[in-house]
Image (spheres, rainbow, N blue to C red):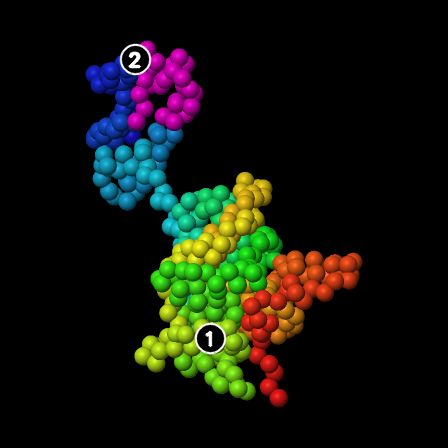
Amino acid sequence: MVTQFVLRKQKKNKAGECPVYLIVYFDGARLTCSTGEKCKPADWNEDRQQFRKSYPLAEEANDLLTLMAGNVLKWWRGVRAAGQTPTVAGLKDILRPKPEPAAEDTTRPVAVWYEEYRQSMRARGYAWETLRQHVVARNWFTGYEQWSGRRLDPATYDLAQHDALLGYLREVRKLAPNTLYTAVKDLKSFLRFLRDERGVAVGVELRKLVAKPADSPKLYLSAADLQALTDAMLPANLVATRDVFLFCCYTGLRYSDVVALHAGNVQEWNGGRVLRLIQSKTRAGVSIYLTAAATAILDKYADPERLRLLPVHPNQVMNKYLKRVAKLAGLTAAADLVSTGDGGIVRAAVPKHELVTMHTARHTFATQSLLRGMPVEVLQKVLGHKKIQTTLIYAKIVEDFQHHTMRRIWEEQSTTDDVGALDNRVCAAEPSAA
């Protein structure tokens, strides 16, 4: 077999370069194939069948021609040993071998892993709100995969990728610190599920996955605010929204619970009435004494033909109407709105009515109950908190405790005139049964 490299000058391109061809002679046959290399005629040595030194990287280019000749020789010997006929197609495959196919990515997308986790929670009876939150978390993690081009693989997840995920959630998705904290908490519970219940190797110690929550002020209404809402003259279409909100201020109910109240939740107790229900969010059973103010609202909307106890609008509508209600009630004093941005704290004075939502009622009930002297352990039962640490959050934000205590100690003044609201029983807990 004889190999020969030739420059095809008749195929010169616009740049004056000609292709280098390989010609192979064996057993009376002749095969011709382009090497893919090209140069100007002045850079080609016909006698030596190689590039001149004037050609850029001539040494590397000549080594490539030598390698091609050696590969062709090996190919020809293999073809001859197999009794086959050499072809141009076979020669091309040797000169320009096809790249090896990329290794198939066998890792599962995080959406597949996470959906298995959610279905497991669904089968175990987790609340709808919890399952919905994990849909949001799944979308965050799937978005990170698309943004980074990397799979969030439990086996290879490490602190470097965790930092990249935090950066994506904070800077690209613009998550607030407490929302970011929730995302990390969901991620850890997800990885713990894979590790402990599905036997999947997790490549990082979960205790090292850290995100810090931020203390955010919780808006609650004072006794004077509650009185102003009660006395406010409102358009007819806003009265029901005001009343439902006040009912939540007197009972501590979340929106998801008040919207589902029905006659079966109200029971007689020791000459009065109580609410007994299973909370939608936590599945905790609670029993709440209905004070005179709360009972009056129920009686106002008593209607045996209506399935629900109170006329509750969708949550977004309630929040929209509440801002109008609070403004008409005169809750226009400036409130301190604290947010985070660019690694710092941003404070702004915002009218209180713009910050009122349905959840403000729950904060109001908790803080007003503590101000009236309700023990934290009792408040925990009424709110349905599983851990008393959650209830203690409200004790931390009631600055009035500090002021009342200091005034009592330093000035020896009674504070009962400042603590009371419409009625000392407004936020009372259910008395213990005899």
Residue 90 drawn above or below residue 313: above
- Tell me, yes or no, if residue 34 can be seen here: yes
Q: Is residue 142 above or below residue 3?
A: below
- Residue 428 lies, in percent from the top left, at 58, 74
For this rendering, which residue is in front, 329 or 51?
Answer: 329
The amino acid type of the residue labelled 2 equals Pro
Can residue 427 be seen here? The reply is no
Q: CA distance from mark 1 to mark 2?
A: 103 Å
Residue depicted at 74% across the width and 58% down the height: 406
Q: Which segment is the magenta one? A: 36-65
Q: Does 59 lie within the magenta span?
A: yes
Residue 30, given in percent of the width and then of the height, sits at 22, 29
Q: Secondary structure at mark 1?
A: helix
Q: Which mark is residue 393?
A: none
Q: Nearer the viewer, residue 304 or 144?
A: 304
Query: What residue would you read off at disc 1?
Result: 296
Foreground: disc 1 or disc 2? 1
Amino acid residing under circle 1: Ala
Q: Residues within 10 Å of mark 2 (few under 14, many from 20)?
A: some
Residue 165 belongs to magenta span: no
The C terminus sits in image quarter: bottom right
Numbered tag placed on residue 41 in the rendering: 2
